[in-house]
Image (cartoon, rainbow, N blue to C red):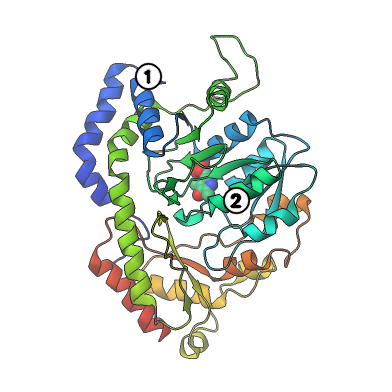
């Protein structure tokens, strides 16, 4: 039996007829850009996440860029975020000419360490950009408190967290702006690239909408330099079919995560993501990420030649041998896993000029050498999940 890290085949089998119909309906309508599907999706997604305004766009990356631009963040401004994220989080800050300032993350939930934010605030700081990484909501109550105290804007990176809530309130509805991605592997995935910006403020929504269409409030009148970043009607139609399923899918992910927590709790050498007691918090479990702390001697001495840790060496990160070895061995047994993320953003070559050195964000760097994402998707079967657990147990015990 093979266990993929992610698979859409069952979802497609189930939704196939509805998706066929939706896509053909758009093609036959001749309304490929904007129109009723886009409007319907924007309205129902806004409803789902409890904000008055949602503007669809081309991708989660564009959502971040449009949000930053709409808040007038640009050259000379600093934005505080975490380095343990997908590259686009920081790339968007740089794309508008601002400077990403990284603080470390917490070791148990992998999220921005709220206790380190105040220390990173300078006169140039304009905003905080928290990432609800792997679907786990940041403590937005506390974060909004810090933002208010220092008059900072808040842009939530909700790319991995569609369906997550903190304190009973959906992510993306806390900050000035929430940015979503509908990349196919996210909790709510389109049939290609797609994204959205969510906000309570009509003026921000208006600016985002304008900027996403060449800074053009009226046909051929350009008041700003913008982008071409619209949500395609076909993608909107696909999202309209899938959105009503989101809550069920998140609940299924939650069950899978709970089962991993339970079945893996006594496997040596693994640290599991922290458990949450708070009943008003919804973790959307886009990923189930464990930390590989060690492999048994039996395994490592038999595979000494398999020194796969070139990334950790060349980037000055802690040794990732145990994690890399475990990943390799799982793969040999048919269990595919993914490393989100092997290199922290602050040490990427693209950010050489920022001058971060190895050792500057210790938790982030350690995580990059230890993390491993186990297969998780709503349709994973019990026997597939048992295989993941049993293979881990066999290898690590
Ligand atoms: C996927 C992702 C993005 C970017 O979204 P795209 O739709 O791929 O552009 C941004 N931030 C995080 C944390 C992501 O996971």
Seen in the picture, residue 343 relative to 322 is either above or below; the reply is: above
Q: Residue at point 52% right, 89% down?
A: 301
**Left or right position of 161 against 350:** left
Mark nearer the viewer, 1 or 2 = 2
Q: Nearer the viewer, residue 356 or 306?
A: 356
Which quarter of the picture shows residue 188?
top left
Seen in the picture, residue 195 relative to 248 is either above or below; the reply is: above
Q: Residue at point 74% right, 56% down?
A: 119
Q: Is mark 2 within 8 Å of ligand 1?
A: no
Q: Residue at point 68% right, 35% down?
A: 96
**Left or right position of 168 against 68:** left
**Left or right position of 190 against 88:** left
Q: Residue at point 35% right, 17% down?
A: 31
Asked whether the viewer can see residue 1, the reply is no
Q: Nearer the viewer, residue 298 or 366?
A: 366
Residue 371 position in % (x across, y down): 52, 68
Kind of element beneath mark 2: helix
Q: Give whichever of discs 1 and 2 has the lower sequence position.
A: 1
Disc 2 marks which residue?
143
Q: Quadrant of the N terminus?
A: bottom left
Residue 292 position in % (x across, y down): 50, 75
Disc 1 marks which residue?
35
């Amino acid at each position: 039996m093979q266990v993929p890290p992610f698979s859409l085949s069952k979802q497609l089998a189930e939704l196939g007829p509805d998706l066929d119909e939706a896509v053909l309906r758009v093609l036959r309508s001749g309304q490929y850009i904007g129109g009723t599907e886009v409007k319907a999706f924007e309205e129902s997604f806004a409803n789902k996440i409890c904000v008055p305004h949602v503007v669809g766009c081309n991708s989660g990356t564009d959502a971040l860029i449009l949000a930053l631009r709409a808040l007038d963040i640009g050259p000379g401004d600093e934005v505080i975020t975490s380095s343990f994220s997908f590259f686009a989080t920081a790339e968007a800050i740089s794309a508008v000419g601002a400077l990403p300032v990284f603080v470390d993350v917490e070791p148990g939930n992998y999220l921005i360490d709220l206790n380190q934010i105040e220390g990173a605030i300078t006169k140039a700081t304009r905003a905080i950009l928290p990432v609800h990484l792997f679907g786990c909501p940041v403590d937005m109550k506390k974060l909004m408190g810090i933002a208010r105290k220092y008059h900072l804007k808040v842009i939530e990176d909700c790319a991995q967290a569609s369906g997550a809530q903190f304190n009973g309130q959906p992510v993306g509805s806390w900050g000035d702006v929430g940015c979503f991605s509908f990349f196919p592997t996210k909790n709510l995935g389109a049939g290609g690239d797609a994204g959205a910006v969510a906000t309570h403020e009509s003026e921000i929504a208006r600016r985002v909408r304008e900027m996403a269409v060449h800074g053009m409030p009226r046909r051929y009148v350009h008041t700003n330099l913008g982008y071409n970043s619209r949500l395609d009607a076909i993608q909107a139609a696909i999202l309209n079919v899938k959105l009503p399923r989101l809550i069920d899918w998140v609940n299924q992910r939650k069950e899978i995560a709970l089962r991993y927590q339970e079945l893996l709790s006594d496997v040596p050498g693994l640290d599991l993501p922290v458990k949450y007691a708070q009943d008003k918090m919804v973790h959307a479990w886009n990923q189930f990420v464990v930390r590989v702390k060690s492999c048994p001697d039996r395994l490592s001495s038999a595979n000494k030649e398999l020194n796969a840790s070139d990334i950790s060496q060349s980037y000055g990160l802690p040794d990732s041998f145990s994690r890399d070895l475990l990943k390799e061995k799982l793969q040999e047994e048919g269990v595919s896993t993914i490393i989100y993320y092997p290199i922290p953003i602050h040490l990427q070559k693209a950010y050489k000029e920022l001058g971060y050195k190895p050792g500057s964000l210790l938790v982030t760097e350690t995580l990059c050498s230890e993390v491993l994402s186990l297969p998780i998707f709503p349709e994973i079967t019990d026997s597939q999940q048992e295989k993941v657990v049993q293979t881990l147990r066999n290898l690590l015990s």
